[in-house]
Amino acid sequence: MRQSKTEFIILMAALIAMAALSIDAMLPALSFMADDLSLSDSNDRQLIVTTIFIGLAIGQFIYGPISDSIGRKPVIIFGLLVFLLGTVVCVYADTLWVLLSGRILQGLGAAATRNIATAIVRDGFKGDEMASVMSIIMAVFVAIPMLAPALGQLVLLVATWRVIFIALLFLAIILLIWFAWRQPETLPIEKRRRFSMGLIFHACKEVSSTKVAIVYTIIGGLVFGAFVGFLSASQQLLQEDYATGEWYVVVFASLVFAFGLAAVLNSRLVVKLGAAKMVHVSLLGLVAVTLLFVAPTYLANGKPIFAVLMVYLFFVCFATGLLMGNLSALALEPLGHIAGTASAVVGGSSTLIAVSVASVVGQNYGGNVYPFVVAFLSCGLLALLIMECVRRH
């Protein structure tokens, strides 16, 4: 039986959402992992979130060029197998470092499902039809982070944190069988290019010599890094220190909703204002809201009332949602002739910068919001300064 358009969209959405599900389903379980693995430093649990981004970053560098050479299907199958291996490691992990090794492997595998699935959509659809398909897929992609912590919380009501990984294991097996059986190859042999490390090095060289690409890659890394720093410590901050308990998943979903709302509005506003203007306005908004938040934070000794914190975080997530898509588009704009490989270089580099920033932010968490305020303010101001310097030169 031929694959229907509906089946294709559901399959691609599931593949793209694997990374988000693997990250966000773990959040309610971090304290249980910390206890079970006898972590001496409570902040070490944040590494369970941030390390998966290392695998995602590395994977972006290699999967795109390889898929252009051998086709999309074998690369996604390989990625799912790597993800399965990493998940098995996580299930049986008895130390933090073994668990982190599994998380890096999960990220490495999920990088294939996320990035190459998008390439498959691009292979099969053009113009307005492609935009329509991607909008549906992105709607699912936004919904998954909203639901993932709740799914993790449900598992914890009846089982241990390891069962969350077992659930991911079964999901990956289902996707592997479904994809291998039902999804045809979308890249014809005549359109494939010979793989060469030289292509990657050439793309890295061209990206590094293109001022616009460098600027927006760095800005993307800074902004995303501040956000991932908050994300990795959000369970400690919201669930434990603000005592939201099982309501943490609802609180987290409201913040993800801000991302979705930003994506919807950005698709309309960017046509009128342009991506560069949207980035500038969003950065100004992020800095302004953070400056307004400084006073209540200082007066409350780093722990403002919950309602004020949620209003601030909603605006931060909204601004970040506006920034991420536009920054990527601006970085790649002058590199259309090597779009696939350049996307891998820009995405991987930006993610590595983000992991570095996030590690510093998260590891400085001490029961108050000061690290996040400093991160969003300093990264936002630095991003604005970089944009201004480039504009003047």
Image (cartoon, grey):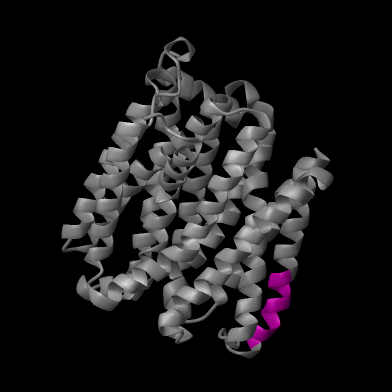
Q: Which of 365 and 325 is in front in this view?
A: 325
- Left or right placement of residue 22 versus residue 101 in this view: right
Q: Is residue 249 magenta?
A: no
Quadrant in the rendering for residue 366: bottom left
Quadrant in the rendering for residue 295: bottom right
Residue 100 lies, in percent from the top left, at 28, 56
Quadrant in the rendering for residue 93: bottom left
Residue 280 lies, in percent from the top left, at 76, 52
- Left or right placement of residue 108 versus residue 94 in this view: right
- Left or right placement of residue 347 versus residue 182 in this view: right
Quarter of the image containing the N terminus? Answer: top left
Relative vertical location of residue 143 with respect to residue 332 in this rendering, above or below: below
Total tally of numbered discs in the picture: 0
Residue shown at 55% from the left, 61% from the top: 226
Residue 176 lies, in percent from the top left, at 29, 40
Residue shown at 36% from the left, 61% from the top: 47
* In the image, farthest residue toward the top: 190
Magenta span dominant secondary structure: helix
Residue shown at 61% from the left, 80% from the top: 309
Residue 306 lies, in percent from the top left, at 58, 85
Q: Does the magenta stretch include residue 295?
A: yes
Relative vertical location of residue 348 with respect to residue 46 in this rendering, above or below: above
Q: Is residue 311 shown to the viewer in this render?
A: yes
- Left or right placement of residue 18 versus residue 275 in this view: left
Q: Which of 268 and 349 is in front in this view?
A: 268
Quarter of the image containing the C terminus? Answer: top right
Q: Which of 89 and 181 is in front in this view?
A: 181
Q: Is residue 385 shown to the viewer in this render?
A: no
Relative vertical location of residue 345 with respect to residue 284 in this rendering, above or below: above
Residue shown at 41% from the left, 44% from the top: 15
Residue bounds of the magenta highlight = 289-298
